[in-house]
Amino acid sequence: MPQHKSAVKRVRQYASRAEGNKNRLSKAKTLVKKVRSSKTKEEASLALKNAVKYLDQLGAKGTIHKNNASNQKSRLTKFVNKIK
């Protein structure tokens, strides 16, 4: 257990940030699944637009690394382009 007042505050901050990150990562996974489960090209491209925007936001905030976001966007775009 932390002994100093500032350390106690840090523990609270880490907990709230971890909770927020967990929610954001969960939403990102859901958006990626929507793209992957799309049957038509139109549906997939709409889902891709939402997923790309959200992944960019996560990368900018530092929730995930910018290169990680970029790699995921690239893979999803390739997937959508292969749909006929």
Image (cartoon, grey):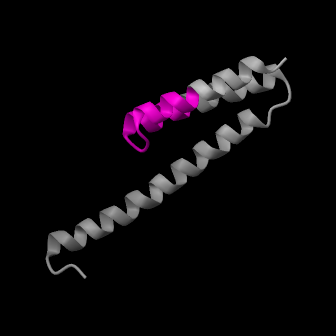
Residue 53 included in the magenta stretch of the image: no
Q: Is residue 32 above or below residue 43?
A: below
Where residue 27 appears, as percent x and y from the top left, is 60, 46
Left or right: where 37 falls relative to 55? right
Quadrant assignment, res 60: top left
Where residue 9 appears, as percent x and y from the top left, is 24, 68
> Image point 62% across, 45% down: which residue?
29
Q: Nearer the viewer, residue 79 or 63?
A: 79
The quadrant the C terminus occupies is top right
Where residue 28 appears, as percent x and y from the top left, is 58, 43
Q: Is residue 77 above or below residue 54?
A: above
Query: What stretch of residues is rendered in magenta?
Result: 54-73
> Image point 79% across, 26% down: which residue?
43
Q: Is residue 44 above or below residue 34?
A: above
> Image point 71% across, 41% down: which residue?
33
Counting the numbered discs, the total is 0
Q: Nearer the viewer, residue 8 or 35?
A: 35
